[in-house]
Image (cartoon, rainbow, N blue to C red):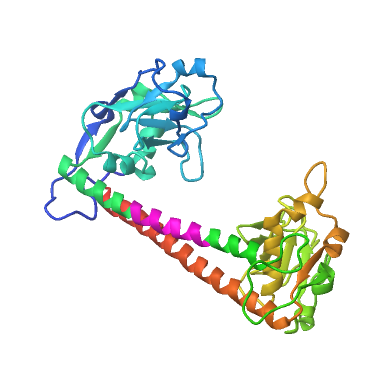
Amino acid sequence: MKEQKKQPELRFKGFTDDWEQRKFGELYKKNLERNKDHFSSDRTISIATMRFKKEGNGAAENSLVSYKVLREGDIAFEGHTSKRFAFGRFVLNDIGDGIMSPRFTTLRPTQDMPIKFWKQYIHYEPIMRYPIVNSTKLGTMMNELVVDEFLNQPVLVPELSEQQKIGSFFKQLDNTITLQQRKLELLKKMKRGHLQQMFPSTGQPTPQLRFSKFKGDWKQNKLSGIAKITMGQSPKSENYTDNPNDWILVQGNADIKNGEVYPRVWTTQVTKIAQKGDLLLSVRAPVGDVAKTKYTVVIGRGVASVKGTDFIYYLLEKIKYSGYWERISSGSTFESINSNDVKEAKFYVPKEITEQKKIGNFFQKLDQTITLQQSKVEKLKILKQSYLQKLFP
């Protein structure tokens, strides 16, 4: 095994000494404190998310005496494996004193330790991989920590003032990420609100919110009347025109995840094909998902610009959020929408093409803003990972 560097690549001014090798047993000890009717269920901590579960986790009040107490600064081992944490992970309690399920192992600091630093360091997989691998065993539901073996594992530790400096830096960066994430969630919430207000409610011929100059009731149409619905094969590209009545909706056998279309690769038979830029409506659980295809839905690759299908796309999004498809779906093994139900579904649509385009353009710009904000969040997360690599040896 390659010897670990004793200094990080990036240092704050004034710090030049090697980090000191210590054993975890010098820093942490077994936490045996039990909840002797001190904390109620609303102080139950979710180890997976490090959040208080105000509703508890379903345990009876009289069983809470067996729960472990997790004080601020304590760490808990979460043994479920994932792509990011192949052997489990440690999480630090920075939210306040509470209780946790007795099935998790918890350790308590032996001395005052900067929480902001250890929150990052104890959770950083490249540092913790080997100590965890060397001190865990396979359990029935998740990996289990062998505490005595873990406490005997070595770790590099900087001096206290450097811990504080690094911890404060990451706290500030985390606050920035949280702020930008909240802005993203607000934008998504605003979009859903506008979808509800700018498309008519069920049974209503006009929306609550409308662009100026447009008046009068919208016209009720079948979905097959406002879009060509191709069931099972791709439309020919020459069918595309700028006329919304010729826009094509492909409804087929593919999965949609986070707004993108993924082909079903478990079969070599090509059952459904959608060309780049088509709209695709999912008919299987979760029913009603809609996306603009970015590549040919078979096993294709590549990215293409989206054609002028914006109004219908956002109409389908509004329908999805309204729960319409779930109300008409059926199936014993999985939920599914009948193809005739898709064609016969009736919705109100503006009579004027200009109003349709106006609505489509509005939501397209809003989506662009959301995408830019999402990119900002992702870049900050990548930046944090870069700093973790450079500020930890």
Is 109 rendered above or below residue 270? Answer: above
Asked whether, in this view, residue 188 is left or right of residue 114, the answer is right
Horizontally, residue 208 falls left or right of residue 235, namely left
Task: State which quadrant residue 332 falls in.
Answer: top right
Residue 242 rendering spot, x and y as whole percentages:
72, 84
Q: Nearer the viewer, residue 208 or 62?
A: 208
The N terminus: image quadrant: top left
Q: Nearer the viewer, residue 39 or 138?
A: 39
At x 45%, y 16%, the residue is 65
Image coordinates for residue 352, horizontal then vertical, percent: 74, 81
Please tell me whether the stretch drawn in magenta is mainly helix, strand or loop.
helix
Q: Is residue 264 magenta?
A: no
Q: Which residues are magenta?
A: 174-187
Residue 291, x across and y down, in percent: 67, 64
Say above or below: 124 vs 272. Answer: above
List the single residue furthest toward the left: 14
Q: In terms of depth relative to the viewer, which is nearer, 284 or 20? A: 284
Q: How many marks?
A: 0
Q: Per the image, is 177 magenta?
A: yes
Q: Is residue 308 visible?
A: no
In the picture, measured across the screen, residue 73 lies left or right of residue 184, that is: left
Q: Nearer the viewer, residue 32 or 12?
A: 32
- Please name the residue shown 36% across and 44% down the image: 124
Instruction: Please determine whether, in this image, residue 261 is positioned above or below residue 135.
Output: below
Q: Could you say where residue 13 lies in the image, as x and y percent from the top left?
A: 14, 55
Residue 140 lies, with reference to residue 15, above or below; the image says: above
Q: Is residue 383 visible?
A: yes
